[in-house]
Image: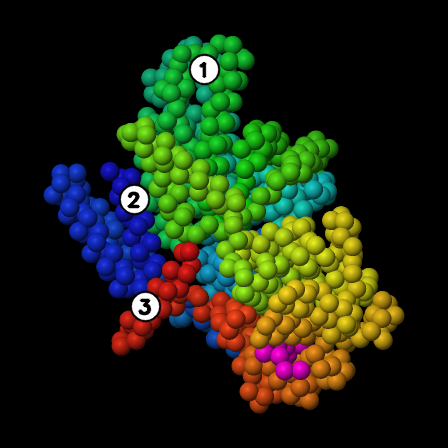
Amino acid sequence: MLVHVTAAFLAGLLLGSFFPFSPLLCIVSLALAAFCFAWLVRSGRLNRRESFLLYASLLAGLVYWTYCAWLNAPVPLSRLAGNAPAVITGQIVGPVHYAPGRASFHLAVGQLNHVPTKALGGGTLRVTWREPDRDLQRGDLVTLVAKVHPPSGQVNPGGFDYAAYLARHGVDATASVSGPRAVRWVGTTEGPSPWLLWRLVDGWRDRIRHAATASLHDPALGIFLGIIIGQPGYIAPDVRDAFMATGTVHILSISGSHLSLVGLLSFFLIKQTCRHLPARWLLSLSRRVTSTQLAALWTAVPVTVYGLLAGAEVATVRSWIMIMVFLLAVWLGRQERLLLSLACAAFVIVIQNPRALYDISFQLSYCSVLAIALVLRASPEEERDGLPPVRRIRDRFGTWLTTYARITGGVTVATLPLVAYHFNQVAWLGLAANLLVVPLAGLVLVPLGLGSALWVMATGSETLPVATLNQGGFEFLSDLAHVLARTPGAAWHVASPALVSIVLFYGVLLAAMSLQAPRRVRLVCLGGVLFLAGWWMYSPRNWPQGDTLRVTFLDVGQGDATVIELPDGKTILIDAGARHDTLDIGRSVVSPFLWDQGIFRLDHVIATHPQLDHIGGLPAVLRHFPVGHFWSNGETRPEPFYRELQQTLRRQSLSESVALEGRTIVETSTCRLSVLNPAMGRQAQALTRADSGSASNNQSIVTRLACGPHSFLFAADAESPALSRLTTVEASASVRVLKVPHHGARSSLDERWIRHVAPEVAIISVGNRNPYGHPREAVLQAYGQQGSRIFRTDRDGAISIIARLSSPTYELSLAREATLTPVRIGTALLQDERRNWQRLSHQMR
């Protein structure tokens, strides 16, 4: 019954999360649930006590979510701090995450500008410190001076919501500082404190990290730190991509699989040790506890130590709870009731934090463990109990391999929709790759790395023992992942499945696994599972070709990225945003958007000019998509981001074409994309290195797209000299939609050119809180006086324009408007809720 009660409570939490956005729909859902329970009681399928308990659990989940949302309401730290840099004092309340040249941590704010914030609830600030000059630990009191910003991120159709992610982790605001002594340590809590244990653990972790950096080098260093002490910030992007392609990326961060393998190995060793004790000791021991109970008890020790070394991250703690509940079930002799243990673990986790329901780590971990439980429950009785005994090593290995293959297959199938939805990938290779990678990592490298870490903790050594063995072992793991990743079709990218199809997938999967259902029904449901999985892998492009044109200006922060989908199905990408230390726009924003649209090939890629905010993300795009033609302005740069682009072009066997005035990039019977800038007379100059940013901006590629009655001008970063020349170019006159040049900078303000272009719609691609002050107020006024409708990616998110060549009208949609907003209580409630229904319906398709 506890399983059903937990399921009802989780459903209540789900309803509670939607209550602020759709209260009427939630009330109707509760009424329908009451009707269903009444029908089940009347038909004899439930008794009244069970029905009451389930419905009460449903209501309790809704009320508990609402209470926690009120209790954890965000603290307006950014508003309290103001626009100027603030003096912030607080205490570090979570593990500090390190990466090369960077540290980040959560700070419980105690004072803002020397004014206590306790009366307002304190608030939690996520701080990023570049070039740190000291280690920090939980419980440290620190002071810093920084601008405080509300959580924000890029808003694109189907994109990752970074602001919501921070909110789920209790972050109220963000700040960043740079340079030594930017964060000043002022002390720690004196006397007995719960922080003493965490400071001891953090000290161990810092010692291990320093020993590893002194003993290992990449890629072994990054993998070692990721799977031994939970510091994945040192893992190189290409290593992570290789593990992602093979479906083994879960190995790189401490998760349920690591803790489970440590627990499994510890349990086996302890139980075997007990069996080899002297007979007299064994007899005396058996009067109190069995060897199984003793193994369960002592297995909790290494699992807990490993979890502490990992920093006791949220995801690690959730996995630890699941394992502890299972070990408790083993102690009580109820290990066969895995589903009951999982229900208990889920209940404990969501009581501690209801928002875990929407956390991808919880979803993947819980689905994986649930799949393992169901596979083991469906296994033959003799396989689960170990009867009859298998004597030959070959038979033992065969039995183990069969069981492990079933578990791997079950976990892969169970997590397939989640991985496809969140990561746009079907990790089919994981079925085989996990058979190699997981045993190597979990049974060899993790014990080796943990042993080395414990040695450093015990002796205070400044280097790792057996460093050569660690380097070779972890490097071999990286090489194995790269070899597997080169399998044709390994990185099988897909469009994110619709939420409705995910629910249908899990429904038919459970029906296919039901032992009570008729065999014919199970076969039909299995066919449904295969059909949905195949459809997702196929990911047909949902785009009505013929006379429909779509242009999307993506929200990539301070940068540019535009996707053009022509009526004949051709796709053009103009720029791909920047690449930062922790965020590659090409990999994290542009590529997922293309996959979600069912776009798996780019006919043309245009790099308008070699500046980081325009081409920094292009290498990632070029690695993941076949490209027909690559265009640039011919300019070269010495910076690493440009060299990386050139290396990627060579690896992909792509030649670089120079786009100059008068060239036509695309010409069909209905559409034409032509180049207006750089000018032909400056061809020799365009092929040389620019002396300044302005020279590079004025040589950037400006293109005009004409499709029937619709026209677009993509002005890149052209500044006043280039715009003044374009005023004399008839092809740039009177366009309907303009991508405003240079993010609305003052240097690109030319009122004569604006009157010449006379756009109906002016779109500014700009980053929120950018350090340049873009867009300038004078630029906004100039386009406003021209009568242009102005849209900005920092406020509106991605902006899409869909037009039909047979009609002069077009549809303009803003990604920001597609997000759910709390309804207003009063006469506007029905109108607000109806809009949220439409948004929710669009998200679920």
Circle 1 or circle 3, nearest the eye:
3
The location of residue 276, given as percent across then percent down, is 48, 14
The location of residue 305, given as percent across then percent down, is 51, 38
Q: Reading the chain from its start, which is encountered first: label 1 or label 3?
A: 1
Which residue is drawn at the image coordinates 44% and 40% (left, top)? 531
Q: Quadrant of the C terminus?
A: bottom left
Q: Amino acid at mark 3?
A: Glu
Name the secondary structure under disc 3: helix
Which residue is drawn at the image coordinates 51% and 10% (left, top)? 392
Q: Which residue is mark 1?
A: 275
The location of residue 290, given as percent across then percent down, is 37, 20
Confirm whether residue 799 shows in the render.
Answer: no
284 vs 805, nearest the viewer: 805
Q: Are marks 1 and 3 in contact (CB under 8 Å)?
A: no
99 vs 91, nearest the viewer: 99
> Is 740 a magenta residue?
yes
Circle 3 or circle 2, nearest the eye:
3
Q: Quadrant of the N terminus?
A: top left
Q: Which residue is mark 3?
A: 833
Q: As displayed, is residue 687 above or below residue 243?
A: below
Which residue is drawn at the image coordinates 32% and 28% (left, top)? 519
Q: Are marks 3 and 2 in contact (CB under 8 Å)?
A: no
In the image: residue 374, left or right of residue 565: left
Q: Amino acid at mark 1?
A: Arg
Name the secondary structure under disc 1: helix
Confirm whether residue 645 shows in the render.
Answer: yes
Q: Which segment is the magenta one?
A: 733-744
